[in-house]
Amino acid sequence: MALVTITIDTGNNQSFESDEDYLLLQQKVGRNLILFQHLEKLIKLISSRREVTIRDSSEFEEVNNKLNNKYYTSTFGQVLSDYEKIYVSSEKEPQEPKEIEGDFLVSTKLSIETPEWYRTERLSSLKLLLEERNELVHHLLETLDRTSSASCKTISTTLDEQQLRIRTEIKSALELLDRFAFLGSTMARKEVLEEFRRITKLSEYGLFDLLSEFNLSHSDEERWSCLSSASHYVKQSAPDVWTEFKSQAQNASLKKEMKESGLFDFTSVTTSKGGTRQLYRMTHHK
């Protein structure tokens, strides 16, 4: 009887370089998924309030609950069709508003007139990002060779380009939301905006990549890095980034901004001299 040997590659023999690239890739996947979630949240918030009619003050709670249910249960793809209707081409004849029968307390219909090219570009970009989000969630492993440094770097570059496009759409959604400031009367609009801005702030400054890079190259076996050393690294390697951060952070400390972002874990250790050293690592380090 012939002896058949089966070899299973567990990835333990991969090179140190590819392992580092794979960890960085994991962190960028996490970053983009967080950005996608916030884009989806903004699109849902705006779309669910696109058309609202309240006939009596007693209906406020009922209507608000109905809108919240739509907000929380609809998928990104489902609300895009409503979001599309907000952008009205300036090249088409404006439609007469639909007359609402009976008495009503308040009635709103959100719309913004834009050139056709802008409307087409905005909606095409959103649909493409929806497809890319689905690919990232469901099919990333089909194209990834985690033992290959080149494969990890190629996908990392794609993710960096992708996150810039996500931010463009988020900025557009925020501007649209600011136009319709009265949305705050039916939902915690301020909370939504602050949550997004808090999580993306470090990425906007360029600190996310720098802190991630330092964490990968200067960490212990459990991926912890010294926060003060990371701060010094940022100041030395990217002084412009550090200056921009300090000018915009309103005297907040780096640790405070990192903690509020939700992208980092923190711990502390006692030094040989009895002092305390603050450590951090990326939340998506595993």
Image (cartoon, helix red, strand yellow):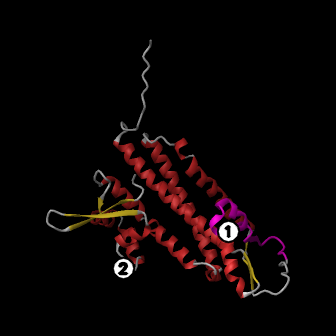
Task: State whether residue 156 is above or below residue 81.
Answer: above
Residue 282: image quadrant is bottom left
Residue at 83 percent of width and 81 percent of height: 100
Residue at 76 percent of width and 71 percent of height: 88
Looking at the picture, how far across and down is residue 152, in whole percent?
Answer: 46, 46
**Any mark on residue 267, and which?**
none
Circle 1: residue type: Lys
In the image as oriented, which residue stretches furthest toward the top? 1
Position of 2 compared to 238: left or right? right
- Check if mark 2's residue and mark 1's residue have beta carbons within 8 Å: no
Looking at the picture, how far across and down is residue 71, in whole percent?
Answer: 64, 69
Q: Secondary structure at mark 1?
A: helix
Q: Secondary structure at mark 2?
A: loop
Task: State whether residue 144 is above or below residue 85.
Answer: above
Q: Which residue is mark 2?
A: 251
Residue at 30 percent of width and 59 percent of height: 225
Number of the front mark, 2 or 1 = 1
- The mark that comes first in sequence, 2 or 1, is 1
- Residue 76 among magenta residues: yes
Neighbor class of circle 1 (other Cα within 10 Å; few <14, some 14-19, many 20+) is: some
Q: Which residue is mark 1?
A: 70
Circle 2: residue type: Asn
Residue 49: image quadrant is bottom right
Q: Which residues are magenta?
A: 71-95
